[in-house]
Amino acid sequence: MDEAIRMSTTYPANLLGRSDIGNLNTGSMANVIVFTDDFKLEHVIFKGELRY
């Protein structure tokens, strides 16, 4: 699971040369999708704001 998360966040951001996406560091965009344990969508945070 850890590697799958890196493959969908950190690695693409690095390929694009972007340090403001793909992580949860201060100053990053804060786009986050939160799933339940059975992978159902629970929350969407887009640019730091809860959307769902």
Image (cartoon, grey):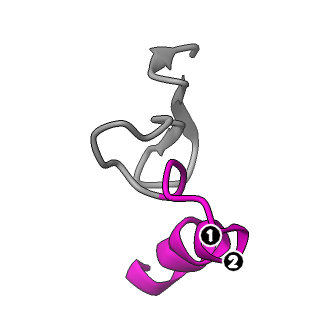
Could you say whether the residue bearing mark 2 is in a helix, strand or loop? helix
User: In the rendered structure, which segment of residues is drawn in magenta?
Assistant: 1-22
Left or right: where does residue 32 sit relative to residue 23? Answer: right
Q: Which residue is mark 2?
A: 15
Identify the main secondary structure in magenta.
helix
Location of residue 41 (image quadrant)? top right
Q: Which one is closest to the eye, mark 1 or mark 2? A: 2
Are there few (<14), some (14-19), or many (20+) residues within 10 Å of tag 1? few
Of the image marks 1 and 2, the number of the one nearer the N terminus: 1
Work out whether 25 lies above or below 32.
Answer: below
Give the camera-side residue of 24 and 39: 24
Q: Amino acid at mark 2?
A: Leu
Q: Is residue 11 magenta?
A: yes
Residue 20 circle label: none
Q: CA distance from mark 1 to mark 2?
A: 11 Å
Location of residue 7 (image quadrant)? bottom right
Q: Which residue is mark 1?
A: 8
Q: Amino acid at mark 1?
A: Ser
Left or right: where does residue 3 sit relative to residue 25? Answer: right
